[in-house]
Image (spheres, rainbow, N blue to C red):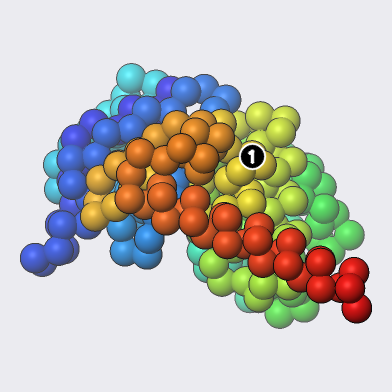
């Protein structure tokens, strides 16, 4: 479905993405992880050209997105949902109006757009808040509206750019639950940039680890996090082991007390 070939991006003297190669199969949930600044978000933003690549190809159903004109790109983006780090909701519009907006601008009638927006909000558990404006919603609820906005187009591919990065830790779980449900039912192929290890372990069909703009390891979560072949993979393994040992020590301490 998606094939990224020799993707390259440089900002001044910084090489952000260095001849990256990656393929994603239909229905697959692929999670991209790595240290901050490794090129994860730049990569995912280049797929639908929120950032223009310097060179390389992004093939989606045998169409090179990097070669599309403006009209072709607008059409392609209707097939590719994108969930941002920031919620990017319009404050004066209600939840359902925010979800409807792109559909109406794309030529759908208000009645058809309303029905699709309502269904999308139902998928993320926000059907009871359709008339509320962003300022009346928590951060987690706003992000769920942002997810519904992407789902309303019924995309074949969903791109997630650290969707929990702007959330208070107490609100992260509600967004991850929505993402897990979507991954479980495989309504769309998913490419997820995240730092959430538990989500990656639970949901990913494949983990892709990046460092310095390149893929350094890819494989099943059970492989990458148990028998890593890269330095980044070993760091994640150590972090997981530390978190597990800390949790075990805390539980033991509570039993003694």
- x then y, percent, for residue 193: 47, 51
- The answer to whether 250 appears left or right of 160 in the picture is right
Quadrant of the image containing the N terminus: top left
Residue located at (27% from left, 34% from top): 21
Furthest toward the front, the residue is: 256
What is the count of numbered marks?
A: 1
Q: Is residue 50 above or below residue 152?
A: below
Looking at the image, which is closer to me, 123 or 38? 38
Looking at the image, which is closer to me, 226 or 161? 226
Write down the quadrant of residue 7 in the picture: top left
Furthest toward the left, the residue is: 13
Furthest toward the top, the residue is: 62
Tell me the residue that label 1 is attached to: 203
Write down the quadrant of residue 151 in the picture: top right
- x then y, percent, for residue 205: 56, 31
Residue located at (47% from left, 23% from top): 25
Q: Is residue 159 above or below residue 13?
A: above
Residue located at (71% from left, 33% from top): 184
Looking at the image, which is closer to me, 183 or 234? 234
- x then y, percent, for residue 49: 32, 48
Looking at the image, which is closer to me, 84 or 74? 84
Q: Using the rendered image of the protein, determine whether residue 76 is visible from the camera's viewpoint.
A: no
Q: Residues within 10 Å of mark 1 (few under 14, many from 20)?
A: some
Quadrant of the image containing the C terminus: bottom right
Q: Is residue 33 above or below residue 90?
A: above
- x then y, percent, for residue 256: 89, 73
Residue located at (66% from left, 58% from top): 244
Q: Using the rendered image of the protein, determine whether residue 166 is visible from the camera's viewpoint.
A: yes
- The answer to whether 24 appears left or right of 6 in the picture is right
Secondary structure at badge 1 equals helix
């Amino acid at each position: 479905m998606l094939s990224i070939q020799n993707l390259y991006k440089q900002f001044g003297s910084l090489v952000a993405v260095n001849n990256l190669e990656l393929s994603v199969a239909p229905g697959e949930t692929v999670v991209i992880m790595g240290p901050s600044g490794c090129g994860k978000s730049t990569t995912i933003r280049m797929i639908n050209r929120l950032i223009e690549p310097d060179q390389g190809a992004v093939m989606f159903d045998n169409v090179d997105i990097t070669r599309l004109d403006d009209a072709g790109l607008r059409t392609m983006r209707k097939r590719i949902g994108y969930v941002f780090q920031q919620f990017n909701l319009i404050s004066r519009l209600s939840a359902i109006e925010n979800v409807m907006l792109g559909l109406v601008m794309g030529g759908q009638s208000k009645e058809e757009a309303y029905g699709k927006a309502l269904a999308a909000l139902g998928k993320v558990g926000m059907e009871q808040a359709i008339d509320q404006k962003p300022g009346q919603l928590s951060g987690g609820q706003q992000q769920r509206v942002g997810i519904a906005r992407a789902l309303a187009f019924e995309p074949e591919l969903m791109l997630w750019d650290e969707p929990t990065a702007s959330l208070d830790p107490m609100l992260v779980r509600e967004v991850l639950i929505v993402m897990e449900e979507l991954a479980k039912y495989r309504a769309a192929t998913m490419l997820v940039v995240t730092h959430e290890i538990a989500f990656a372990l639970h949901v990913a069909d494949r983990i892709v680890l990046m460092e310095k703009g390149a893929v350094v390891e890819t494989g099943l979560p059970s492989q990458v996090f148990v028998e890593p072949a890269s330095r980044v993979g070993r760091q994640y393994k150590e972090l997981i082991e530390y978190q597990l040992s800390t949790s075990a020590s805390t539980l033991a301490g509570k039993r003694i007390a």
